Image (spheres, rainbow, N blue to C red):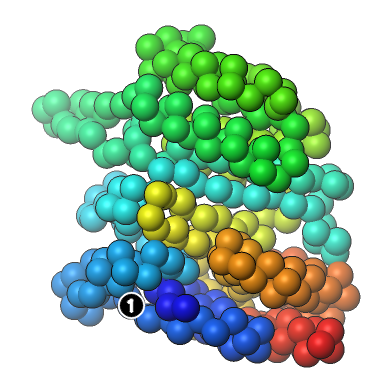
Amino acid sequence: MKAVLIPGDGIGKEISESAKQISAVLNTGIEWEEFHAGAEYFEQSGNLIEPGLIEAIEQDGIALKGPTATPIGKGFRSINVQLRQRFGTYANLRPVHSRIGVKSRYENVDLVVIRENSEDLYMGLEYKIGTDTAHGIKLITRQASERIARFAFEYARAHGRHLVTCVHKANIMKYTDGLFLEAFNHVAESYPDIAHNSVIVDAMTMKLVIDPTQFDVIVAPNLYGDILSDLCSGLVGGLGFAPSANIGDHQVIYEAVHGSAPDIAGKDLANPSALLLAMGMLLKDHGMSEKADALEHAVDEVIRKGEHTTRDIGGTAGTREFTDAVIAELEAAE
């Protein structure tokens, strides 16, 4: 099986190397086709995306992507957004799980954030009105809203989950978020076996912080989904443990949720767990559930033992030491 690997910027190269090493130890049989994209590649070549990358994702249908940097308030648009729009990966799936050994005030968190990926403010429809005013357009369509709602209910049914919660701000944005909520409620009628409710986005942040275990599957428009998924990762130890998948009809791009962390790039300090767990999602989706489970167990064991953990979770190990410890756990379990 061939899959595209995009190391990205900053710490991306280091954590991508971890993923390649562990893929080999797991004997996944994946042939990685490596391409460059992002700010660093732009500085070197003048191009945001290496020639051949788009065609490779089209052909392979699978990509594992490291973090890419995006200029703030200027420059080019996010590579993530460009790839999602190019391949129509309309559903962003972000699982959130408590992990033994990771400091958190919460226990037994097990929820999934499903984020609509194709529209809302992330379409980038904005312009300047003179020098002191800017206008951004929030685009919500019934088709995309029903599609993501249906994805959420189908995911819940397939994975034995029992509640789908729609997040919105329809009390204020009555047309856009009102349409999203209306579409959600319409789709919910086709899934009488799964409970559903809706929560206003600001109330949702409070409810998640008070008790995240009251939620199961959360579905939201693009912007709210982005914010809430980061909040949820903070409930279980941070973005270092936040994998995701961008899912379309023909292509899936798996990635770590966190950024490129340029301040620690090249210093052997990064926690590769998020990208490793994203690779686990890839393996599970492509008939290698046993290997995915073995990988997740090995990561959890390294964290639980606490002898080779990275600084973000209170340890002193670097990326390579953490990776070697995961490999040792995999080999010991054979």
Split into 4 quadrants, where in the image is the C terminus? Answer: bottom right
Image height of 26 relative to 40, above or below: below
Asked if residue 202 shows in the view, the reply is: no
Q: Quadrant of residue 232?
A: top right
Q: What is the secondary structure assignment of the residue under circle 1?
A: loop
Determine crowd level at label 1: few under 14, some 14-19, many 20+ residues with C-alpha closer than 10 A.
Answer: some
Residue located 59% across and 88% down the image: 24
Residue located 56% across and 66% down the image: 286
Q: How many marks?
A: 1
| Residue matched to label 1 | 35
Residue 289 coordinates in the image, percent (x, y) = 69, 67
Dot 1 amino acid type:
Phe
Tell me if 166 is positioned left or right of 13 in this view: right
Tell me if 309 is positioned left or right of 65 in this view: right
Residue 213 coordinates in the image, percent (x, y) = 80, 36
Asked if residue 89 shows in the view, the reply is: yes
Residue located 52% across and 30% down the image: 149
Residue located 78% across and 90% down the image: 331
Residue 163 coordinates in the image, percent (x, y) = 72, 29
Residue 81 coordinates in the image, percent (x, y) = 34, 50
Image height of 116 relative to 274, above or below: above
Tell me if 54 is positioned left or right of 332 in this view: left
Image height of 150 relative to 295, above or below: above
Image height of 179 relative to 272, above or below: above
Q: Quadrant of residue 120?
A: top left
Tell me if 229 is positioned left or right of 97 in this view: left
